[in-house]
Amino acid sequence: MTRKPDLPPPPYHGLDPERSFDRLTEPVGTSRFAQAAARAAHGRTDLAKRGYAPDGTKRLRRFSTWEICRYMIPVAPAHFRRVLKSNPDLPQGEGSGGTRWFTLDEIVALRDHFDSEGSKAKQYKPWRPDGVQAKVVAVANFKGGVGKTSTAAHLAMAAALDGYRVLVIDLDSQGSMTSILGGDVPDEWSTVFPLLAKDYASHVSQRNHVREAEGLAPLPLDETMTAALDVTAKDVVQTTHWPNIDLIGAQLNLYWAEFQIPVWRMTARDWPLWDALPNFLEAEGLLDAYDIVLLDTPPALGYLTINALSAADILLVPLGASFLEFDSTGRFFDMLHATFASIEEGDNAVRRTAGLPEQRFEWDAVRTVLTRYDAGQQADLANVVQAYFGDMMAPHRQEFTALVGQAGERVSGIYEADPRDFNRDTYLRGREAFDRTYADFKDLLLGCWWRDEMERNGGGE
Ligand SMILES: Nc1ncnc2c1ncn2[C@@H]1O[C@H](COP(=O)(O)OP(=O)(O)O)[C@@H](O)[C@H]1O
Ligand SMILES: [Mg+2]
C-alpha cells in the first residue's frame, strides 16, 4: 500500500508572534524612503550598464527588404530591387544578395522616391488632406495597467512606419512612454509643465493689463513664471531614435503640476486650465508640423488628463475583458461626463453674461479598445463588454501577446523587435494584434479627416 505524503499546513498557519517580532525591522521613517530611492537609483545605473535599461541612446534597428515590401512600401520585392539597381543614388541598404537592411530614415527617402516616380495608381504615402491639422489622440483610462502606454507606443510606431509624422506627449510622471522612446528629461522644465505655466502666465499678464486700467493691484507673477512666457516648442520637444517620432517627455517632477495647477486656479479663478495644452499645440504650429499628436496619460483623472482630453480629437480608452476593468471604465466615463459637463456649465454661464454663444466640448470619435485579450478565457466577457459599449467599442480585440512583455528591456514592443528573434508564427500573430489595433485607429483618423474636408468644402452630404 502506498501512502500519499501528508500535505504541509498552509504557510500562514502556526506563525509565532515572538518570532515574527524577531524578523521585524525598526518602524520606518520618511528618510528610509530616501534611502530606498537612492539604492534603487544605484541599481538602475547598474542595470543600465549591463544593458537592461534604456540608456537614452536607443537605436532603432534596420528593416529588411521583406518587411519593407510587406508592411511599408506596397511593391513586389523584385520590382523594389530593380528600382534600387537602376537608381544608384537611392539608399542601397546593408547586406548582400536578395535581402538588404535599411534604416527608417532610408525607408522614408525610398518612400518619397516611389511616391514621386512610382505608379500613380498606388498610394505610397498615407493619406492626409492638404491644409487640415494633425489629429490629437488621447489614450486614457483612470485604471492603471489596462494597456494605455503599450497601445499608445504601438500606435505611434505603427503610424511612423506607415509614413506619418508623430509627436508623442507623455503626461504620466512615471515616464514609461519616455523610457520607451529613450527620452532625456532632466527635470520638469523638459516636460509639459512649462507650457502649462506659460498658459497661466499669459492669462495673468493679460488680466493685469485690464486690472491696471481699472486701478486694481496686479495679480502676482514671479520671475520663474515670467520666464515661462518665453517657452517655445523647441524647449520641450526632443527627437527620438525614431526619425519621425518626436517627444515631449515626462519624469517624476511632472507630478508637481497636479499640486501647482490648483494653486494657480486660486489666484486666477477664471483661468481655463483645460485649454493650456491645446493652446500650446495650436500656437506653436505643432498641429501643422505633425500628422498625429499622441497623448499618453496617467492612471488618474487629474489636471493633466483633463488637459489631454480637452486637447483630444480622438479618445481611445483601453480596457481588458475583466469585470473590474469593465466596471472601472464605466466609472471613468461617469467621471468624464461630470467633469466636462461642469466645465461647460461654468464656461457657458460666463459666456452668457458676456453675450457670447454657448460652447460645448466635442470629440471626433471615442472608442474603447479591448487589450490583452485571451480568446480562450475571455470570449464571454468580451462579448458582454462589446454589447454594452456598442459602437463606442473598436471592432478589433487586441490579443494578449508574450512579445510585448518579452521584447522588454532593450527594445520596446513588437515594432522594434527583430522578427528573426522569434518563431515566425508567434511574430506574425503578435504583429497582427497591433497592426489591427492600428488599422482600427487609422480608420477613425481617415474618417475624421474626410469629414473635416467635407465640412471645409461647404458640404453636408
Ligand atoms: N496586447 C498585450 N499583450 C500582452 N501584454 C500586454 C499587452 N498590452 C499591454 N500589456 C502589458 O500589460 C502591462 C500594462 O500595460 P501598460 O501599457 O503599461 O498599461 P497602462 O499604461 O494602462 O498602465 C504591461 O506589462 C504591458 O507589457
Ligand atoms: Mg501607462
Image (cartoon, grey):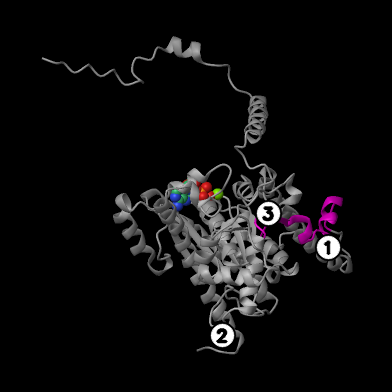
Question: Which of labels 2 and 3 is toward the front?
Answer: 3
Q: CA distance from mark 2 to mark 3?
A: 35 Å
Give the structural element (helix, strand or loop) at label 3. loop
Q: What is the quadrant of residue 309 in the picture?
A: bottom right
- Three-letter code, disc 3: Thr
What residue does disc 2 label?
A: 454
Q: Which residue is mark 3?
A: 240
Q: How many marks?
A: 3
Residue at point 78%, 59% (across, down): 234
Mark toward the viewer: 1 or 3: 3
- Give the amino acid at mark 1: Ser
Instruction: Residue 374 in the image: state x and y as whole percent.
Output: 35, 51
**Quarter of image, res 429:** bottom left
Residue 144 visible at all: no
Which residue type carries mark 2?
Met
Q: Position of residue 333 (x, y in %)?
A: 47, 60
Mark 3 nearby-residue class (10 Å; few <14, some 14–19, many ≥20) = many
Residue appearing at x 40%, y 63% in the figure = 396
3D distance between C-alphas at marks 1 and 3: 35 Å
